[in-house]
Amino acid sequence: MPRFAHYAAIDWSGAKGERHRGLALALCAPGAAAPELVRPAHRWSRAEVLDWLRSDMPPDTLVGLDLGTALPFVDRGAFFPGWSESPADARALWALVDAMCDANPHLSTCDFVDHPPAAEHFRRHGNRKGAQFEGRGRLRVTEQAQREQGLNPYSNLNLVGAAQVGKSSLTGMRVLHRLGGHVPVWPFDPLSDRGSVIVEIYTSLAAIAAGRAKGRTKIRTHVELDIALAQLGSAAIGGSGPIDDHRSDAILTAAWLRANADRPDLWNPRALTPEIAATEGWTFGIV
């Protein structure tokens, strides 16, 4: 019997404003039925996604968030070396980001990234590189493992460019903090025998598993999406014409979670230590 009764994938957005075209949420049950978009005609806000996770998510759901759940820590023994208030672990980081950004609307994080001791570690708009931003940016251990699997991760400390994930990650940390104890977040929390669980996902991993070429993982037509879904044992969504890649990412990754949720190796990555589990977290699907 599958561990989970539902599988959800959320394509996240760290953009400014309240509602975002880049936010998409797809859900499926065990079996082969195609994942469906939740509120397909709706333009989500981050606060509404938080409310869905708290109150509307079906029981026993494995939900993937497409963002980095923490910042690099292991390489230098701290999130923000040299800053006396640098948090000791990921949960303290989430709390700090949320507290410092309490006045920022729509779960944005402007006050944190502009706070001078923190800003020293980020690359911000206008190519403003903090004195401690190194090269392309520090990577977590899971991101180094992503490279070994042929992916092209970006540092969560990079807040610039179309491929950056830093803003999404920081806004997501506010959501994770506000979830409190409502939903466990793996690997910061151990996997339990029942109940819902949040994991970090990398949508390109799902696309590659579905037969997409590296560097061409974005799917923008219904026909391409149905071909990829079939590779994951899923029925087609049908339809024709274009589909935006945020929605296709959510739909395909929900199907990928369903196909891979019961693989023991994905819950026990070789490089995942207790220290990494408490500080940096891990991307589900990276072994």
Image (cartoon, grey):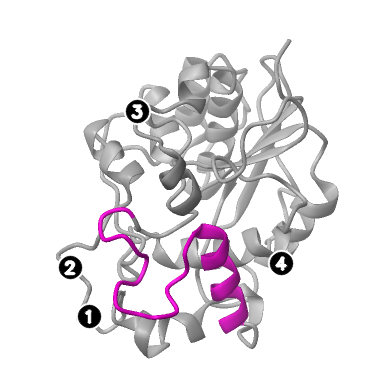
Which badge, 4 or 2, is on the more N-terminal residue? 4
Q: Position of residue 209 (x, y in %)?
A: 40, 23
| 265 relative to 275, above or below | above
Task: Answer yes or no: is residue 45 visible.
Answer: no
Q: Which residue in the protein does label 3 denote? A: 212
Q: Which residue in the protein does label 1 denote? A: 127
Q: Which residue in the protein does label 2 denote? A: 134
Out of 232 and 88, give the one closest to the viewer: 88
Q: Which residue in the protein does label 4 denote? A: 47
Looking at the image, residue 174 sits to the left or right of residue 180; the answer is: left
Confirm or deny contact between disc 3 and disc 1 (CB under 8 A).
no
Looking at the image, residue 267 sits to the left or right of residue 5; the answer is: left
Furthest-top residue in view? 1
Magenta segment main secondary structure? loop
Between the C-alphas of marks 3 and 1, the distance is 32 Å
Which residue type does callout 1 highlight? Answer: Asn
Front disc: 3 or 2:
2
Mark 4, Cα crowd under 10 Å, few <14 / some 14-19 / many 20+, is some
Image quarter of residue 236: top right
Q: Measuring 30% from the left and 58% from the top, which residue is drawn there?
A: 155
Which badge, 1 or 2, is on the more N-terminal residue? 1
Q: Measuring 67% from the left and 38% from the top, which residue is drawn there?
A: 197
Q: Quadrant of the C terminus?
A: top left
Between the C-alphas of marks 3 and 4, the distance is 32 Å
